[in-house]
Image (spheres, rainbow, N blue to C red):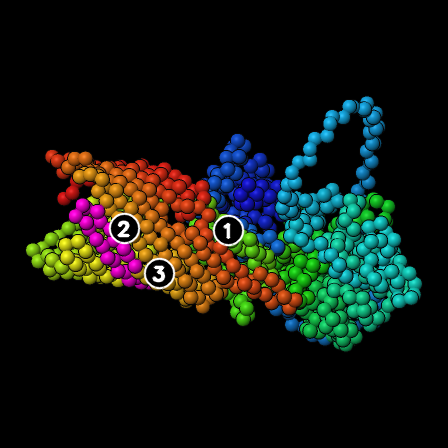
């Protein structure tokens, strides 16, 4: 199933609360599917959902009428049309439009919005004496526990059945490739028991390999019940004691245990697993009996390797409620001077601190959540968390009890404030709420990203979480939501444009590094690259693993579309040419310009000036360089007989729009020779690049015509290409280097009778690449041949048949360096890779053709039946073509 079709189905299954968040980016990435996508999502939709879709897509009144009255029966038709459109667009645009995923490959996400700067610190005022107590969390009535289903009685044992003779063991089969995980694999009953994991996009993070395996998360709270069924296997070393050698860890209430389960409850098919179910927990008691001092808390985090610190608590102000910086009489000086140095030690040790914003419904978060306002050095590894109410509101707006982001907007993020947790450890599930429960979801999200991107720094992890957060609709209000709602799906995908980091540290845009294969190569590079994994980076320096095939401009395309326009142009070429002959020995063939641009609009010219019986000069402009060489010289009647390039030298005809000059001489009555040079502008193979390069060629030819009519010639020449290899183009691989091809050819035309003649040619070449790009070297061997017969039974009729193999690489290897590994410091390691350039298919064209000239009306009729196999040397790309033409010369 095409990926875009899967994406339609995924979006169709989303609830209304997530529709805007997911559909708006999809419409930005795939604008060509706007109409089909909205119609598909509107099938069987409620009026409210249809209204929401109209707002998201900015639909006009006419579009609303057309889209939202789509009959149910058209659902499959729309899906099929989308899949077909995806194939056609990929084939025409040559673009990689698969969505990239870590360690599996895909396509870049839209560029992220920039992270705003923090607000300036408020004016100082006196502070109350701190009294750390946990913030209260309103707890809705829990859902009733599900009733167990009775197990069926065991079936009676069957009667023994006689066993047949054993059959021979089958031949061992090669193992099947491992199945790639998809988000649906993780939507278990345990996952679905509450919807916060789905709202966060955690299933997408899991499918991309994130579980937070081994990441230590400190839970600073009332303690943790380390014997709880969902936590007993999740405790990190040092977490079983309040202090080293001291009291065994326990929870003085239930708050810390609920928070710990929200972070990392085990994935064991019971209750609800935590966001970071693979993480290890380091409980630290900061409240109640045996609470550690602030200094000892951070020291214990550092001692036992905590990488994330969850803090679902705050200071309280006089009269109750969360203490804010503005509540301090000294303007937060005591908070800054006491907590700043302590937490700076933790930040310097690489710990990310996550803080609940508080449950007082204030416009500002707690003073500790906003601490970087007073201590700017903490900001890169500090997160404040507000709560959104996704369960009771389809819009997921800010919960009424939650403090807002306020002055902490630059490091503030939102998460669901109501989730289901097995609070009492008895297998029952109960709703808990508050910023105290939103914070551990963010702590879990940080741990997942640390697992998936182990080479990113803690500050880069925080930046990624903030930049990727959903900022659509109301979530763009930074005073309330800060950087938006945490989106683990977006955070685990490439953000912005993909980049390639070179071995020198230079950053190269990925789209400037792709290679466009020529027909001589077929899909050889694409297939060779598919066996290599590349490490690319997104705009936030996060590494992603992609299939090497993404370097091919045709990586996601169907087999090449047969260029019927080019065949038609050759078929009609003789009717576009006009001739002029002078008494001075000049013959001039020329054509008027066309409707295109550039050289297509200028026309073509072929000139032959005979100075003496033994010497002639030729010149050409914007035409096939082989027009006066090889078979076209030995057997001029072949010139316009076929609609293929069967009679042209393939090395000269890489570009059919060349210009050149030559000298030709006759040596006696049977021998002739010639020397010709050409230069042509090679068409740009990438639509977004306007420049083009030149190719140059020089060729000499020596021929013999026997008295019997047998004619043969030998050709030797050299072709020089800039930034290309036999027509293939890649700025990154080839750089500004050149490829030089030494080629030779043999042409034969032999009469079978007075009216029939057999002809053939064989060309072969050896190409060497001199590159200053990623490629070190390449040596390529190629060939092409034609074999056919042509006859003229009467003066009006011409008949013929041929077999033709266009230019094909039969043997070759490209040695190049590619970004295939990741170093511990997040830099990219480049390694040498040898890519086979041997074309998989063998492009063959079999043609039968005729030509008839009416003697009375001077009307010419032409026809051709062409069978094409492995077009562009891509195996299985076959077609059949019939062309008929009638013209009256004038």
Q: Secondary structure at mark 3?
A: strand
Q: Which residues are magenta?
A: 689-716
Q: Residue beneath label 2, please?
A: 747
Marks 3/2: CA–CA distance = 17 Å
- Label placed on residue 742: 3
Image quarter for residue 316? bottom right
Quick one: quadrant of the C terminus? top left
Q: Earlier in the sequence, mark 1 or mark 2?
A: 1
Residue at x 65% of width, y 66% of height: 824
Is 721 magenta? The answer is no
Is 704 magenta? The answer is yes
Residue at x 22% of width, y 59% of height: 674
Q: Dot 3, how many residues are within 10 Å of its Cα: few (below 14), some (14-19), or many (20+)?
A: some
Tell me: 383 left or right of 142.
left
Q: Residue beneath label 1, please?
A: 527
Tell me: 225 left or right of 109.
right
Q: Nearer the viewer, mark 1 or mark 2?
A: 2
């Amino acid at each position: 199933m095409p990926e875009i079709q899967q994406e339609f189905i995924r979006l169709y299954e989303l609830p209304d609360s997530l529709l805007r968040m997911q559909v708006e980016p999809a419409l930005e990435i795939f604008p060509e599917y706007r109409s089909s996508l909205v119609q598909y999502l509107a099938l069987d939709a409620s009026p409210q959902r249809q209204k929401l879709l109209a707002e998201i897509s900015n639909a006009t009144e006419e579009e609303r009428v057309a889209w939202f009255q789509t009959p149910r029966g058209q659902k499959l038709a729309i899906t099929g049309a989308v899949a077909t459109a995806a194939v056609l667009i990929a084939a025409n645009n040559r673009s990689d439009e698969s969505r990239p995923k870590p360690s599996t490959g895909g396509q870049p996400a839209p560029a992220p919005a920039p992270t705003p700067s923090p607000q300036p610190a408020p004016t100082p005022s006196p502070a109350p004496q701190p009294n750390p107590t946990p913030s209260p969390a309103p707890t809705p009535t829990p859902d009733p526990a599900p009733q167990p289903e009775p197990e069926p009685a065991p079936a009676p044992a069957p009667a023994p059945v006689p066993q047949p003779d054993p059959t021979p063991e089958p031949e061992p089969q090669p193992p099947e490739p491992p199945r790639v995980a998809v988000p649906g694999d993780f939507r278990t009953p345990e996952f679905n028991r509450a919807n916060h994991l789905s709202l966060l996009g955690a299933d997408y993070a899991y499918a991309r390999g994130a579980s937070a395996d081994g990441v230590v998360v400190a839970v600073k709270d009332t303690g943790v019940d380390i014997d709880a069924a969902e936590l007993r296997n999740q405790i990190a070393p040092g977490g079983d004691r309040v202090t080293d050698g001291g009291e065994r860890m326990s929870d003085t209430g239930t708050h810390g245990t609920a928070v710990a389960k929200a972070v990392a409850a085990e994935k064991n098919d019971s209750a609800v697993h935590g966001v970071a179910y693979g993480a290890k927990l380091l409980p630290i008691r900061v409240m109640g009996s045996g609470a550690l001092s602030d200094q000892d808390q951070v020291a214990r985090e550092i001692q036992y390797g905590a990488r994330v610190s969850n803090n679902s608590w705050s200071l309280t102000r006089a009269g109750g409620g969360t203490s804010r910086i503005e509540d301090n009489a000294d303007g937060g000086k005591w908070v800054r001077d006491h907590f700043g140095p302590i937490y700076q030690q933790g930040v310097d040790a690489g710990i990310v601190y996550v803080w609940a914003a508080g449950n007082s419904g204030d416009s500002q978060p707690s003073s500790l959540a906003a601490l970087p306002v007073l201590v700017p050095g903490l900001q890169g590894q500090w997160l404040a968390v507000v709560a959104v109410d996704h369960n009771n509101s389809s819009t997921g707006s800010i919960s009424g009890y939650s403090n807002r982001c306020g002055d902490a907007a630059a490091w503030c993020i939102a998460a669901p404030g109501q989730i289901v947790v097995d609070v009492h450890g008895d297998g029952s599930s109960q709703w808990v709420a508050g910023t105290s429960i939103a914070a551990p979801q963010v702590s879990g999200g940080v741990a997942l990203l640390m697992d998936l991107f182990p080479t990113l720094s803690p500050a880069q992890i925080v930046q990624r979480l903030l930049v990727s957060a959903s900022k659509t609709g109301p979530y763009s209000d930074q005073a309330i939501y800060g950087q938006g709602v945490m989106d683990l799906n977006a955070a685990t995908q490439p953000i912005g444009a993909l980049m390639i980091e070179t071995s020198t540290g230079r950053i190269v845009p990925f789209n400037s590094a792709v290679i466009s294969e020529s027909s001589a190569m077929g899909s050889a590079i694409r297939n060779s690259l598919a066996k290599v994994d590349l490490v690319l980076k997104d705009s936030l320096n996060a590494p992603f693993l992609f299939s090497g095939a993404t370097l091919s401009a045709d990586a996601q395309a169907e087999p090449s579309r047969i260029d019927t326009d080019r065949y038609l142009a050759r078929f009609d070429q003789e009717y576009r040419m006009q001739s002029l002959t002078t008494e001075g020995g000049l013959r001039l063939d020329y054509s008027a310009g066309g409707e295109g641009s550039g050289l297509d609009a200028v026309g073509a010219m072929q000139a032959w000036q005979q100075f003496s019986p033994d010497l002639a000069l030729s010149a050409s402009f914007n035409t096939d360089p082989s027009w006066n060489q090889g078979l076209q010289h030995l057997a001029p009647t072949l010139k316009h007989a076929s609609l293929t390039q069967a009679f042209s030298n393939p090395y000269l005809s890489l570009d059919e729009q060349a210009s050149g000059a030559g000298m030709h001489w006759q040596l006696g009555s049977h021998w002739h020779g010639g020397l010709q040079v050409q230069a042509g502008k090679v068409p740009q193979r990438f639509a977004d690049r306007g420049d083009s390069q030149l190719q140059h060629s020089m060729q000499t030819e020596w021929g013999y015509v026997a008295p019997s009519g047998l004619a043969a010639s030998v050709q030797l020449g050299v072709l020089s290409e800039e930034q290309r290899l036999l027509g293939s183009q890649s700025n990154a691989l080839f750089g500004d280097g050149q490829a030089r091809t030494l080629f030779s050819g043999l042409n034969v035309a032999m009469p079978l009778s007075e009216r029939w003649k057999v002809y053939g040619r064989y060309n072969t070449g050896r190409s060497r690449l001199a590159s200053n790009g990623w490629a070190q070297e390449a040596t390529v061997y190629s060939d092409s041949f034609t074999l056919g017969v042509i006859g003229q039974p009467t003066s009006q009729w011409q008949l013929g048949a041929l077999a033709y193999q266009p230019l094909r690489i039969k043997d070759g290897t490209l040695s190049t360096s590619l970004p295939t590994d990741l170093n511990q410091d997040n830099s990219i390691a480049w390694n040498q890779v040898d890519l086979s350039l041997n074309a998989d298919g063998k492009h063959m064209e079999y043609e039968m053709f005729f030509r008839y000239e009416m003697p009375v009306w001077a009307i010419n009729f032409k026809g051709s039946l062409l069978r094409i196999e492995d077009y562009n040397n891509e195996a299985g790309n076959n077609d059949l073509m019939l062309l008929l033409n009638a013209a009256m010369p004038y």
